[in-house]
Each structure stands twice: as structure tokens, then as C-alpha cells.
Amino acid sequence: MPAPYCKRCLSQNRLVSRLLRLGISQIKQIAGDKLLICGDWAVFLSDSSFTHFQRANVPSRFFQLLDNSLCVTPEYTYYGEYIPNPSRREVNIFRTRDGADWELAYSFSPKTIKHIHVLQYDKFSEKIWFSTGDADAECLLGFADQDFSNLAIIGGNNQKWRTLEFLFTEDFVYWGMDSPIMQNKLFSYCRKDGEIKEIADFNGPIYNLRKIGNKGYIILTGSEGGKSEWDNKAHVWYSNNLHKWQDCLSFEKDALPHIFGFGRLLLAENTGEKIILSASALEGLRNGILFITEAESPHG
């Protein structure tokens, strides 16, 4: 779908484009061959050939997406509101079957949270895990049935429950903190007895935590200018067991202030044998794409 003339003009200026967060922020495959294309504070529905575009009827408070604001399950696709919300109004979760029309699935009451950081489907329990923020009292981590009739809260009222991505195994749930004010750590939750353990410390907020093929696991951390950060860099970390982590690559945040974008790397979905990273606000990379092949893979 052609962009309006004003947006085409604004996007030609790199600083304006970064300040206003213009451009595509996410492409997510949902039911069948349908794609949700998110950008410029709107969502569009397309087929896999990109020959047909339709604006999705997402509620008007749609602002922008984090990497896991969209959650795809076997039956529905969910969207959790990530909005500025200075007055702390209610925060909603919507769902859709077809990607075009959305309905309200759940609302967090006013004055309880600022926004939703992640909604993620756990195939082992068939639940949807979530995390909210931003202040300590607004941080919640838990899971819900797919109709959100029952919510279980694992923890709250502390930055340790503020995360952007979960990693699920048959016996454990893992998450990394996304905090600008505390030491960022990796945690595990034991499904059997509910025990929560601290695993490792990291230099900055953790954006991605994924299993990569059969090779191991990867964590991506960013630079947001928070007082808890060790340096001004985005890092790539690797582990073959989720407990011992190697710092493999790092890139300096560019010279522009953080209002023009955090220094970060984000991991593409379904990377297969290649690790595909998108860069933002990093020296030498700008908003480029970084490929790590098998020969260059972090475990050497």
C-alpha cells in the first residue's frame, strides 16, 4: 500500500525518520499465508506475495510494537498495547482470527500498569505468558489461558519481572530483564515446583533470548543509556547450555542521543542455519542487516 506523500518526504530525512520511528517495525506471519505488516503506527494485512494490502482494524490507540507485542497461537493472534500512557488508563489485549478485525480479549485496570512488554505462546502448557511495566509497582509476569479467563501471576512489584522475551523448554521458562535502573539478569522458572533462580548478569537490557537451530542459545543486549549498563554497546551473547555465556560481538551506540533510537540488535525469526540480526543506531551498521554464517557462528 503506497505511503502518504508526507510520510514519503519525512522518511527521506534519516534523523526525522529515526525520531518519529517511521518505517516497517515488524512483519509477522499469522494464519495461512497471511502477513501482518506493522509500521508508522498502523498495521496492514497482506498475502505472502505482497500483492494485496488491507489496513487492519486495530484499535485507534495502536502506537508501536515491541518484538513480542504480537503473539500467534494455533487459534488466534493477540496484540498487547505498548503505548505511552502517561495517565495510566486501562491497557488492553486484543485478538483476531483473520488479521483484519480485532476484538477485546482482556483489560488491565486503570492505574495498574503502563503498558505490555510481551505476549508469548508457550506450546508446552498452551498458555500465553506476559510481562508488563514500567515502574516497579507496574511490573507483572505471569501466564493466562487463551481466553484470558484465568491469570496466574508469577511475580510483581520489581524490575526482575520486566522482560521482552521468554524462552520455553519442557521443564523451565527463562527470561532476561529489561531494566534501565537495575542490574539486568537472566532467570529461570521451574514448572514442577515454581522455583525461580538467577542465572547470569548482563551488560544491559535483554532484547532477545532464543534457541538457534541445534547450536545453542543467543542473547542480544542493547544500549539505552540506563544507569545499570556496563557500557554504551549492543552485545551478542552465546551459550550452549543457558548457564555459561560468552560475549561474542559488540557494537558502539552511535553519537546521536537516545531519543533518536536505542542502540540495539534484534534477532529475526526462523533464522535456521544463519543468525540474522537487524541493527539500529549503532556505529558502522546504522539500520542495516547483519548475517552471521555457520563458519562465523558465536561458538566458533
Image (spheres, helix red, strand yellow):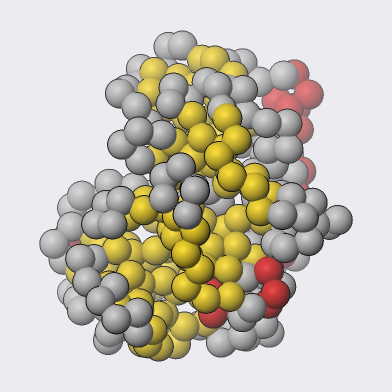
Image quarter of the C terminus: bottom left
53 or 158, which is in the foreground? 158
Q: Is residue 67 above or below residue 193?
A: above
Q: Measured from the top left, where is residue 33 in percent x and y?
A: 32, 22
Front-lying residue, 160 or 291: 160
Q: Residue at x 38, y 23 (%)?
A: 34
Image quadrant in which you'd find residue 101: top right
Whether residue 95 is visible here, answered yes or no, is: yes
Q: Residue furthest top?
A: 52
Residue beneath the point at 49% across and 48% down = 149
Where is residue 19? Give x, y as percent.
75, 49
Q: Is residue 218 left or right of residue 55?
A: left
Q: Is residue 107 left or right of residue 194?
A: right
Is residue 261 rendered to the left or right of residue 76?
A: right
Q: Residue 136 lies in what quarter of the image?
A: bottom right
Which residue is pictured at 24% across the width and 57% down the height? 124
119 displayed left or right of 180: left
Percent across and percent down for residue 274 are 23, 53
Residue 24 in view here: no
